[in-house]
Amino acid sequence: MKEIPIFDVREECGVFGVFGHPEASNLTYLGLYALQHRGQEGAGICSTDGKSLYIEKSIGLVAEIFTERRLKRLPGFAAIGHNRYSTAGGSTLKNVQPLMATFSLGTIAIAHNGNLVNALELREVLEQEGAIFQSNSDTEVIVHLTAHSRAEGFHAKLVDALSRVSGAFSLLILREREMIAVRDPYGVRPLSLGTIDGAYVVSSETCAFDLIGAEYIRDVEPGEMVVISENGINSSRVLYSRKRAFCIFEFIYFARPDSFIFGGINVNEVRKALGKNLAKEAPVDADIVIPVPDSGMPSALGYAAESGIPFDLGLIRNHYVGRTFIEPKQSIRHFGVKIKLNPVKSILKGKRVVVVDDSIVRGTTSKKIVKMIRELGGAKEVHMRISSPRTIGPCFYGIDTPTRRELIASSHMVDEIRKYITADSLAYLSLEGLRASVPNPDDYCYACFTNDYPIPFPSEQTEQMELLFV
Ligand code: AMP
């Protein structure tokens, strides 16, 4: 039997870049700071002064990594940065991006959000041809394919490489005198273009533009390659797909509510609509609606507005639970929830409570929360409402979901889950209700709720994926 893949197939990340600004690395630092929610395992920035590339990266949070001294070591007028999400296997510095490589056409740095589904297959071929990989990251495949391409010139080599990879990629590439932004033809992960002081900025989410005072121009379109240099901005459509597959989970959980993604749609508005539709589909006689902070906040507001039931903050989150705290393993998860959330007895005591959260993955969090609201908070009834459909399939395109076996809804009916989490009632938003909450619903990937994966995997990869994800 083949070896289990050593790639990390669970990458969520954030990318940010700026070209044509004297404070490029400082702005990138701030951009990454605003995108911290997209990845907390490690971060890096690579800058250029037109002659050389400079890089600083580490494990940890953006504010911990980038001291003034380190930022001073990143001179120049352009920079790209990356936040990496904690993953199952690859928690080492060598996987922290940007990745840098030097080959015949110079040095490049690359920052990638998304996940490639044929990386393993391509890596095998490349290794047979003599390529030596430095990391476990699928992103490195793009670097090797570009270096190996016989096409003329860097841009053509890159496009040639990208036409061979399959999956999700919102990419930023830095060379000595240019920055390139490319998005996969399905547009799985968001990527926005903006401007500040005459310079261009590119970010996974627009919340980073708000922090630095940049203006949003438009999205980098699916399949588009944007080359930004001293000659200005040059856009071309280089990759093609008949359909789009914007990740619906960005709206449900992952992106920040103040961001505008997938064509300038506000995340908070969609989340509120999810809550409103959930209230229409799954009403309940209750005294208060409370969110699971922070993920359930906008949808709980929507649920309360639609149902007319008063909204309150019945659970308080400790925002300072950082990585200095030992991440609890499954066996001590109960403790993990308690350290993050505490019920407010004066709000909950004797009440019939609707608790709104964005999703149930393993079910562990909901179970602890229901118990906490009932036993510590003194609630009379606890009604769980989830602002997305049942999560039944793992994501292969860059959202960190556990194996299918661990997804409680992949093997349990709603009432079984209700019993497991010990709620008086449980309801999920329907797929129709989800689709009704976004414009152009056919443009989205719903695979985690339907098992209908819009970007196909190579057959051999599917077998290996199954080993990992069944
Ligand atoms: P679980 O205990 O596994 O059911 O986790 C459910 C909680 O995890 C919910 O409160 C979600 O907001 C949150 N969640 C959902 N998806 C993710 C993800 N990909 N990464 C981290 N947390 C998530």
Image (cartoon, rainbow, N blue to C red):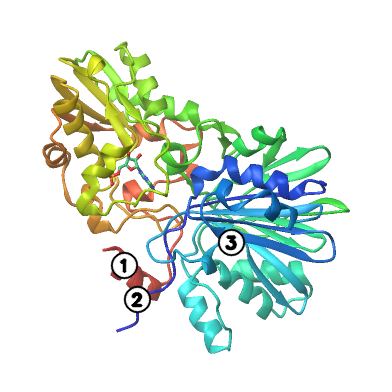
Sooner in the amino-acid sequence: mark 3 or mark 1: 3
State which quadrant residue 110 falls in: bottom right
- Which element carries disc 2, helix, strand or loop? loop
Decide if residue 203 is on the left or right side of residue 308. right
For mark 1, does the 10 Å Cα neighbourhood hold few (<14), some (14 to 19), or many (20 or more) residues? some
Quick one: quadrant of the C terminus?
bottom left
Judging by the rendered image, the residue that carries numbered circle 1 is 468
Q: Nearer the viewer, residue 421 or 347?
A: 347
Give the Cα distance between marks 3 and 1: 24 Å
Sooner in the amino-acid sequence: mark 3 or mark 2: 2
Q: Amino acid at mark 3?
A: Gln
- Say above or below: 4 vs 365: below
Q: Amino acid at mark 1?
A: Leu
For residue 4, the mark is 2
Q: Nearer the viewer, mark 3 or mark 1?
A: 3
Decide if residue 147 is on the left or right side of residue 421. right
- Which element carries disc 3, helix, strand or loop? loop
The image position of residue 391, as x and y in percent, is: 30, 46
Give the Cα distance between marks 2 and 1: 8 Å
Is mark 2 in CB contact (under 8 Å) with mark 1?
yes
The image position of residue 117, as x and y in percent, is: 46, 65
Q: Nearer the viewer, residue 386 or 177?
A: 177
The image position of residue 236, as x and y in percent, is: 74, 55
Is mark 3 in CB contact (under 8 Å) with mark 2?
no
Give the Cα distance between marks 3 and 2: 24 Å
Examine the rendering and report whether any part of residue 429 can be seen: no
Quick one: quadrant of the N terminus?
bottom left
For residue 295, the mark is none
Judging by the rendered image, the residue that carries numbered circle 3 is 97
